Image: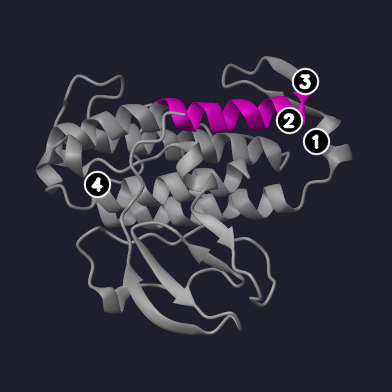
Amino acid sequence: MMALYNQWANGRLYAAAGQIAPESLAEDRGAFFGSLLGTLNHLLVTDRLWMSRLDEESPPGTRLDEVLHHDFDDLRAARLVQDRKLVDYAHGLSEKRLAESLDYATSSGAPHSQPLHHVLAHLFNHQTHHRGQAHHLVGMALGRDKAPVLDLLAFQRSTVPVPGAVSGPISPPRLLPDDAGASAVETPPIGHVVIDAYAEAADPAGEVRSTKRVPAPDSLGG
């Protein structure tokens, strides 16, 4: 679930960040990694670092503040690929593997060994931590009302079973910018309806019979 949530939240954040002018994306706002672009790059850097450890490869020699992509579209494309890799990795894990240890070396070369589920918990918590900083920077640039809802509860409520629909695996909702046209709505996951900024209504047989817009969820603090 956390890999899918991570993918969903990043998708929403990047959709909002894509509305910001390039010079504003790169402007130093006093965040831990300076700008919104720097913060988003840091998350990509660290995710690649941890993914290399999860794949039991030598981690790349990368500075944590390195800007891998100065162009936002390139950064967004790389983020999509990275999130897909993490989702695929998580889907391939067994309960047994999650309980086993992962041996790895830190950036300074110090050896460590921890249960894999501890490592994954850190990875997702680190994403949420810096994504919160990026979310604040988006709100500063666009206005608080344009900052997307990223609550875990919003994700959990965003895919619900459709009675009588053809069953299928739960996939992350593919959310579009709030100003996208209705014709741009993507097909929801098989057997599920996305209850978010856009949704497709299905009849009892599971066939899509109309496309409608429904309100995005309010802030879900509890």
Return the disc, 4 or 1, that comes first in the chain's sequence: 4
Is mark 4 in CB contact (under 8 Å) with mark 3?
no
In the image, what residue type sits under mark 1? Leu
Which residue occupies 32% across, 27% down?
Answer: 133
Q: Residues within 10 Å of mark 2 (few under 14, many from 20)?
A: some
Is mark 2 in CB contact (under 8 Å) with mark 1?
yes
Q: CA distance from mark 1 to mark 3?
A: 13 Å
In the image, what residue type sits under mark 3? Ser
- Residue where numbered disc 2 is placed: 117
Instruction: Depth check: give the residue in front, 26 or 175.
Output: 175
Residue 87 position in % (x across, y down): 61, 52
- Residue where numbered disc 4 is placed: 17
190 displayed left or right of 8: right
Badge 2 element: helix
Answer above or below: position of 159 versus 52.
Answer: below
Chain part drawn in magenta: 114-129
The magenta stretch spans residue 142: no
Q: CA distance from mark 2 to mark 3?
A: 12 Å
Q: CA distance from mark 4 to mark 3?
A: 37 Å
Residue 28 position in % (x across, y down): 16, 27
